[in-house]
Each structure stands twice: as C-alpha cells, then as structure tokens.
Image (tube, rainbow, N blue to C red):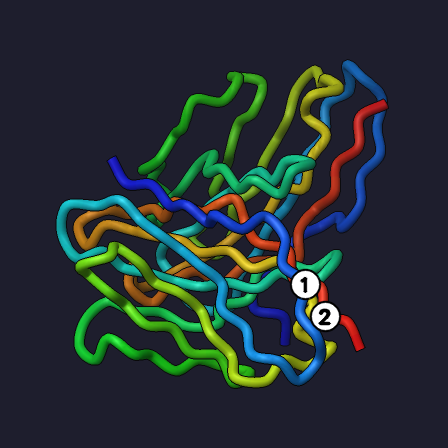
Amino acid sequence: AQSVTQPDIHITVSEGASLELRCNYSYGATPYLFWYVQSPGQGLQLLLKYFSGDTLVQGIKGFEAEFKRSQSSFNLRKPSVHWSDAAEYFCAVGASTGNQFYFGTGTSLTVIP
Amino acid sequence: DTAVSQTPKYLVTQMGNDKSIKCEQNLGHDTMYWYKQDSKKFLKIMFSYNNKELIINETVPNRFSPKSPDKAHLNLHINSLELGDSAVYFCASSQLHRAGYTFGSGTRLTVV
C-alpha cells in the first residue's frame, strides 16, 4: 500500500530565508509524486509533479522538489520565502497503475517578517 | 473561468437534515473525485467517477451518495447529517493520472 509521511507538522521561517519541506513515501515502484499548496479558505493548488525523467523538478511560485529514490523522498524547496508563501503544503503519491492519490497530513508554514 | 466549481461554499445545517453539494468542471476531464478534509487538515478520498462510472468507493457511511449525471458533474448527497460530518469537502478532477488533480475551492459543511 502507498503512504506518505510529512514529518513536520508546522514550520516557521523568516521572510527571505530558504525553505525545505520534507516528504517521504512508501511505494514499491516509481510513484507519481506531487506537492500541493492550500491557502486559508482555498482549495489545493498543484505546485509541481514528478513521474519520470529529471529528478529535480521545477514548479510554480519558485518552488522545486527533488526525487530521491534511495531515500524515498520528495522534498520541496524554495531559496527565498515570501510572506505570501504562508499556507498548508501537502505531498501526495499515486501509483502509475492506480487512479487515486494518497495525501500526507500536511505541513503548515508560517513566515515571519 | 472557474475550472472546478463547487456550490455552496458554506453550508450550515441541523442534524438529521439531507443536503447536497454540487460540483462542475469545465476542463473536459474524464475523472472526478470527492475528498473530505477533517479539522486536522487530513484529506481522505471518498468517491471517484470516470466518465460517469463509479471507480472508487471508499469506506464511507452509505448516507453519502455520489451522483454523476455526466462527466462534467459530480454531486454529493448526504442523508441524515451527523455532527461528525462537519468538514470541508473538496471536489477535484483529472484527465491523466500523472498530471495530478485540479481542485475546487471546497464546501465547508457545519452540522449543528
């Protein structure tokens, strides 16, 4: 069975600082991996996705993520955080042969001035 | 041009009532989903339809019944609402599994 773990429930960073949000997954083959962002009172917006090819993927809003098969990880990074990045971030995994995704429990990001 | 739209955005109702949430997507996607997000932000899939056919039916009370009149619409009807049904319900759609989902903005259901 597939599963996703986001070890950090809540992270606080200063504006302008770098950010890394952790995501570990459990799946036998190469999964489809996603990061979504949820702003307060909003739906989830897709930041980036990985399903094959280059293990470093670029997304919207200056985010990137790196797929590391050996570590079963797909961590999200941003070099310089903006106050508007404060939100809930979800990692999701799906099987290439499946038809649904499994979401992590989310990481809440607070950005302080 | 809203891609996935849900109505209503907020729904407050009393225990025992029956209510529906509507979802429409104008993306031409074949697959639509209902997710429930609880107070701890945990997202759990409830149902999925592909071209009006039910393909995922997770363990949810049978008080919840999805209906897909066509592939652009997926509605959720809930009978005999209970306090524990209070949550945010998200509709989503996708075309290719690997492309990910497009989510609606959610319906916050409060049962009092």
Chain to which the residue tagged by mark 1 belongs:
A
- Judged from the image, the secondary structure of the residue bearing numbered disc 1 is strand
Left-right relation of B18 to B14:
left
The residues tagged by marks 2 and 1 sit, at their Cα atoms, a distance apart of: 6 Å
Which residue is rendered at x = 66% and y = 73% of the image? A85
Q: Residue at x 76, y 50 (%)?
A: B9
Residue sitting nearer the eye, A95 or B46: A95
Q: Amino acid at mark 1?
A: Thr
Q: Residues within 10 Å of mark 2 (few under 14, many from 20)?
A: some
Which residue is the extreme one toward the left? A29
Q: Which amino acid, mark 2?
A: Val
Q: Which residue is mark 1?
A: A12
In the rendered view, does A27 fall on the left or right side of B14?
left
In the rendered picture of this protein, how many numbered marks are placed on residues? 2
Residue B12 lies, in percent from the top left, at 84, 34
CB contact under 8 Å: marks 2 and 1? yes
**Residue holding disc 2:** A111
| Mark 1 neighbour class, 10 Å CA radius: few under 14, some 14 to 19, many 20 or more | few
**Residue at coordinates 39% horizontally, 65% vertically from top-left?**
A75
Q: Secondary structure at mark 2?
A: strand
Q: Is residue A49 left or right of residue B40?
A: left
Is residue B52 positioned above or below A15 on the image?
A: above
Q: Chain of mark 2?
A: A
| Res A7 seen here | yes
Measured as percent of width and height from the top left, residue B76 is found at 58, 36
Mark with earlier residue (2, 1): 1
